Image (cartoon, rainbow, N blue to C red):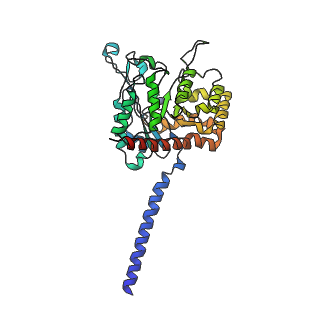
Amino acid sequence: MKTNFIYSILLLLIVQTSFVNVSFAQQKKESKNETTYLFNDSHFHLTNYVQEGTDIHVYLNDIMGNKIGRSTLFGLPLQQQWSYRVTEDFAPTYYLDTDAHLYYYSFTDAMIAMAYLSLDNIDQQRIDPMITGFNVTDMYATEHIKRVLLTFPGVFSGIGEFSIHKEFVSSKIEGDVASFYDPALDRILDFAAEAGLIAIVHNDIDNPYPKAGKPNYLTGMQDLIKRHPATTIIWAHLGLGRVIKPIQDMGGLFEKMLQDPEYTNLYFDLSWDETAKWLDSSPESLGRTAEIIKKYPDRFLFGTDNVAPQEQETQLRVYHLYDRLWEALGPEITQKVSITNYERLFDKARLDVRAWEKANAK
Ligand SMILES: [Zn+2]
């Protein structure tokens, strides 16, 4: 009888302790629950033009914290040369700091992979690294991408952000200038389709300060997307930039693409504070943007496009620049653009790329 009593007390203690453990674990999980997250970041640079940036653990714990659920992760494919002949002791950290060239810096992919691999398993689930360190004019770029996947299996979900036309940058890169009609670019996007890699493409829709009537970069981009119907392409920042203005009737042109079955592989990211500036430049522009997103709510994603941030506030600031747009879209569509579209696209990419790696492992 006495033994039974002691046994019951012990059992009760065990049950209670494990209950406490379960509820603690649950609490911990709930505090990280994605429903409390503001957004997933579909466009994020960990490092800058001189390959320096944010410590990955600081990014996860202090910057993403409990506000950003998941995030893409890429560096910058380009390194700004410090030419002593040009700037002497001044060490440029941005492409506008100097006339010296930029060059493709492939080691960025190893740095991003190593940063990702230093995370624990739970944190890794929140991150989608991207391969960027390839030259888009080189037929061998595809070999680089394959080599990165097979050297770091289980890591990458996509390629990019890489640039075709980018103000002040494209012409500063050593070697050939990128072109929509370069077979090397076709080869890259064909391989992305084969491996299931998402492609984030920066392509300005026009030149800075364009002359009236001059051809812009829309048709070339359209041709490129149509040539690669099996590649998921995210057109970064809607083709806009600091000095890249929306072209005439851009809303109408984009709407035509969104309803055209030839572009079902095309998505847009609303990223960068510079993009918010154009979208929110007038009530008409904001209303038109909201109208198009409401019609095609599955085709837009949100990202910060911040480079090497040092605090969470920097990330949240970009999200809140779009507050008037979120308000116009309402909570359901905002949830799609800022959270669930990301999950759908990147969950699929993870599965597809892992399958490709498994099938091609040596
Ligand atoms: Zn970017």
**Lateral position of residue 231 relative to residue 357, left or right:** right
Whether 53 is drawn above or below 12: the answer is above
Whether 108 is drawn above or below 121: the answer is above
Measuring from the top left, give residue 106's x and y in whole percent. 35, 29
Question: Between residues 255 and 305, which one lies in front from this camera angle?
Answer: 255
Whether residue 314 is visible, yes or no, is yes
Placement of the N terminus among the 4 image quadrants: bottom left
Question: Between residues 229 and 54, which one lies in front from this camera angle?
Answer: 229
**Lateral position of residue 25 relative to residue 336, left or right:** left
**Lateral position of residue 87 relative to residue 27, left or right:** left
Placement of the C terminus among the 4 image quadrants: top left
Question: Between residues 142 and 86, which one lies in front from this camera angle?
Answer: 142
Residue drawn at 38 percent across, 81 percent down: 6
Whether 268 is drawn above or below 340: the answer is above
Number of numbered tags placed on the structure image: 0
Whether residue 44 is visible, yes or no, is no
Measuring from the top left, give residue 36's x and y in whole percent. 53, 49
The quadrant holding residue 112 is top left
Measuring from the top left, give residue 237's x and y in whole percent. 54, 29
The quadrant holding residue 288 is top right
The quadrant holding residue 293 is top right
Measuring from the top left, give residue 304's x and y in whole percent. 50, 34
